[in-house]
Image (cartoon, rainbow, N blue to C red):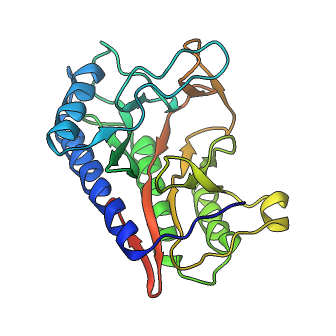
Amino acid sequence: MAITLKKDEQIDQMRRAGRIVRQVLDRMGELAAPGVTTQELDAEAERICAAAGGACLFKGVPGRGGAGPFPGNICASINEEVVHGIPSSRALRDGDVIGIDFGVNVDGWCGDAAETFVVGTVDERVQRLVSVTRNALAMVIEMVRPGRLWSEIVGPMQSYIESEGFAVVREFVGHGIGSRMWEDPKVPNYVSRELLARDIELREGMTFAVEPMVNLGLAAVEYADDGWTVVTRDRLPSAHFEHTLAVTAGGVDVLTS
């Protein structure tokens, strides 16, 4: 791994990007209601980002296999869609949950965050899924500080999620971030033999995006026909929360808060 430690002034630049991300996600939460389409959310995110002097990170990212470049400014993932949902004319309905992931580049520095919103009145178990996933990210933030191993942090988070009866997605993980959207290290949401063999020691100046993805049913996921959208294999709902963090001498700075 080639982890790049950031200087204070570089972290300040990332915080500028993080503020725009936060502004957009807060607005998405205000707008997410029955009858609103994900295309409308996408257009509003692009408008806010441009007005603030940022560039949306996701649009145009090359696809895997035969999938074309990502066409949206946000990832809008509804119900059984875990991540990378493409904005469309699909309208939100009462009882939906929608995970919105958004990233910004400002003057060469990036911020990235995600939040899952409930639309109207949702099933009690789905509401608990969203709450547990949000709490899991908060747990991580409380534990981050220099000198800690990532397994010591993510292990309790995984145990908490699974003790609540939910499943942690394995195929997609968090990541380092800075002058590029994806940097080392990969930041898993679970403990594996690979992590224990090559654990990540947190150091002052590290910046990374933590993003637990949690399923109501089984952990297994697969790609939808569009080549981008990741869905739960059992088609039960999923939730996703993310923040960009900087490790500081005193603990952690949440750059997308």
Q: Position of residue 249 (x, y in %)?
A: 47, 87
Looking at the image, can residue 198 be seen? yes
In the picture shown, does residue 81 fall above or below 105? Answer: above
Q: Residue at x 27, y 20 (%)?
A: 39
Q: Is residue 153 left or right of residue 240?
A: right
Residue 144, x across and y down, in percent: 52, 76
Q: Is 183 in front, or is 44?
A: 183
Q: Is residue 118 left or right of residue 151?
A: left
Q: Quadrant of residue 43?
A: top left
* Count of numbered marks: 0
Q: Nearer the viewer, residue 219 or 128?
A: 219
Q: Residue furthest bottom?
A: 250
Q: Quadrant of the N terminus?
A: bottom right
Q: Is residue 64 above or below residue 117?
A: above
- Let me know if residue 92 appears in the view: no
Image coords of residue 224 (percent x, y): 58, 17
* Residue nearest the viewer, comparing 143 with 7: 7
Tell me residue 104's x, y (percent).
34, 44
Q: Residue at x 28, y 17 (%)?
A: 91
Left or right for 80, reference 149: left
The residue lying at 30 percent from left, 38 percent from top is 55
Q: Is residue 36 left or right of residue 104?
A: left
The quadrant of the rendering that contains the C terminus is bottom left
